[in-house]
Image: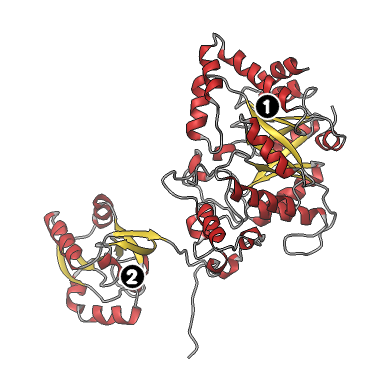
């Protein structure tokens, strides 16, 4: 498989997926899930204590993927580290050969399992992207030269379904200005909304990977509508899941159909399965 | 003003369990307005402690317990009652407690928790609007503070957690960046939001901070 950067730069429809590091030091399952996707996706995102739930670190897990010749997208959030630790971890990542970084503000500590932890948020996502760009130019956050510049392919996240949309677009443009070159979007089910967003993006020199969150049941779809910001699963999809004898299979079909319809309108997709990575291959089987 | 809340009674009694004779200190300023350390609350605490078998040797309510010289003077007036006590319970903010703890001979205990610097919405209702961060941004954000009012202290616009203008951390709370956006748009000043804000200068928020005014 081509790496994320090669695939995007050669205008191939690019596919990324997400694998969550384990809640513990046993990485056997993590590695086997990633290996199962190795020949099907261009790169694999490694989440950074997603939803503020403590897990094995994303830097360590990204290094493990790299050692299996998988192109990792190392996710790094501002929630748990100050600007010294963030730069230091980015330099460590560069030294190990990690290229793709996805830089986010991060979910708040209150969403997770260590609610008494101190939320750091020394930087926000725009500032972290700016600092990663400085490292690429050979300078630290305080404008001092560093020994050996980095060559990160910098990514960010964006929510085309945000309501209201305009403030989100201001943040998005700031991320672009700061040096983000690729974006993975929040899960999107409304293709018209995505098209409006892509129309806005066309004038910018960035790659967009649309977020595909696989629906596993009508219950899950309703949960997303009620609890996840900017995610809106249309009623007809909920009905299809409800009427189906095998909702997971239906969800796989829906995801495959979404990917097919996106093939000509964006640079690729980012597939999320919330822990059920094995179904990604079933989805990809349907679109090949 | 400093907004305070009384500690659970069990916690106060746990502090005092090895003591018998208690002296109580309140505060005539913020803790009076918060109804945590005014005359009424000091009297109430006295009654509770007596009911629990303690002897209350005396009490005092300095005008501002955070004012060290004024508080020391007030305490000197109560020297006898203080001397009889074997612990001091203070119904004032953490600053107030420390006006006394440095020089007190007996153990000192807080009876209330300090929560935040607050604005009064109406009597008995307070909100936090300023974190005393040492480096005020209000000029760039139409007078709304993202350091205090965004749980992630974001300086460059809303995060992905906004849902219909509400914050992901507390769905009852408006996203401060949506509010800032709306006001800037109204005033034709969106350029202020489009400008990338550099990382905050945390060295200006020293712990502990101090200031001496040059006259």
User: Label 2 neighbourhood size at 10 Å, few (<14), some (14-19), many (20+)?
Assistant: many
Q: Label 1: few (<14), some or many (≥20) within 10 Å?
A: some
Q: Quick check: B26 left or right of A232?
A: left
Residue found at x 80% / y 22% = A39
- The residue depicted at 57 percent of the width and 55 percent of the height is B154
Q: Does residue B55 appear left or right of residue A111 in this picture? A: left
Q: Say whether residue B8 is left or right of residue A240.
A: left
x and y percent of residue B111 in the render?
28, 60
The answer to which of B188 and B91 lies nearer the viewer is B188
Q: Which residue is labeled 1 in the image?
A: A30
Chain name for mark 2: B
Name which residue lies at 28% across and 52% down.
Answer: B11
Q: Quadrant of the N terminus of chain B?
A: bottom left
Q: Nearer the viewer, residue B119 or B73?
A: B119
| Vertical position of residue A195 compared to residue A141: above or below | above
Q: Secondary structure at mark 1?
A: helix
Q: Secondary structure at mark 2?
A: helix
Q: Position of residue A144 (x, y in %)?
A: 78, 64
Marks 2, 1 in one chain: no
Image spot of residue A27 (x, y percent): 67, 28
In the image, farthest residue toward the top: A245
State the residue position of label 2. B96
Mark 2 vs mark 1, CA separation in Å: 53 Å
**Residue B193 can be seen, yes or no:** yes
């Amino acid at each position: 498989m081509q790496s994320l950067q090669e695939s995007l730069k050669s205008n191939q429809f690019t596919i990324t997926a997400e694998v969550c590091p384990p809640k513990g030091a046993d990485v056997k399952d993590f590695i086997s899930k990633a290996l199962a996707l190795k020949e099907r996706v261009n790169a694999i995102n490694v989440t950074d204590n997603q939803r503020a739930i403590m897990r094995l670190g994303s830097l360590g897990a990204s290094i493990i993927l790299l050692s299996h010749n998988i192109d990792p997208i190392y996710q790094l959030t501002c929630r748990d580290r100050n600007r010294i630790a963030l730069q230091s971890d980015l330099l460590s990542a560069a030294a190990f050969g990690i290229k793709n970084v996805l830089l986010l503000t991060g979910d708040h500590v209150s969403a997770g399992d260590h609610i008494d932890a101190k939320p750091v948020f020394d930087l926000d996502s725009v500032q972290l992207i700016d600092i990663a760009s400085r490292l690429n130019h050979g300078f630290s956050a305080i404008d001092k030269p560093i020994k050996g510049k980095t060559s990160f392919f910098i990514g960010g996240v964006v929510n085309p379904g945000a309501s209201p949309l305009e403030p989100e677009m201001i943040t998005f443009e700031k991320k672009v200005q700061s040096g983000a070159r690729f974006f993975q979007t929040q899960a999107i089910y409304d293709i018209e909304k995505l098209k409006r967003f892509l129309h806005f993006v066309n004038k910018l020199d960035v790659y967009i990977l649309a977020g595909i969150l696989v629906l596993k049941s009508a219950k899950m779809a309703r949960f997303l509508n009620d609890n996840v910001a900017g995610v809106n699963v249309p009623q007809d999809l909920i009905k299809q899941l409800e009427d189906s004898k095998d909702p997971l299979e239906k969800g796989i079909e829906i995801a495959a159909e979404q990917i097919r319809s996106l093939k000509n309108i964006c640079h690729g997709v980012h597939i999320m399965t919330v822990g059920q990575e094995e179904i990604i291959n079933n989805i990809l089987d349907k679109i090949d | 003003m400093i907004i305070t809340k009384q500690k659970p009674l069990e916690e106060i009694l746990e502090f005092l369990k090895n003591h018998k004779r208690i002296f109580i200190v309140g505060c005539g300023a913020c803790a009076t307005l918060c109804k945590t350390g005014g005359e009424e609350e000091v009297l109430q605490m006295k009654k509770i402690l007596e009911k629990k078998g303690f002897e209350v040797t005396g009490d005092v309510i300095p005008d501002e317990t955070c004012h060290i010289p004024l508080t020391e003077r007030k305490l000197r007036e109560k020297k006898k009652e203080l001397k009889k006590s074997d612990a001091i319970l203070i119904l004032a903010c953490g600053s107030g407690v420390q006006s006394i703890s440095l020089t007190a001979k007996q153990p000192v205990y807080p009876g209330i928790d300090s929560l935040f610097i607050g604005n009064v919405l109406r009597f008995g209702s307070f909100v936090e609007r300023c974190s005393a961060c040492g480096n005020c941004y209000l000029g760039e954000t139409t007078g709304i503070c993202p350091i205090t009012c965004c749980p992630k202290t974001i300086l460059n616009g809303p995060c992905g957690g906004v849902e219909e203008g509400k914050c992901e951390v507390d769905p009852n709370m408006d996203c401060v960046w949506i509010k800032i956006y709306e006001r800037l748009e109204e005033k034709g000043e969106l350029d202020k939001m489009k400008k990338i804000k550099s990382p905050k200068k945390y060295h200006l928020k020293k712990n502990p901070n101090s200031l001496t005014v040059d006259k």
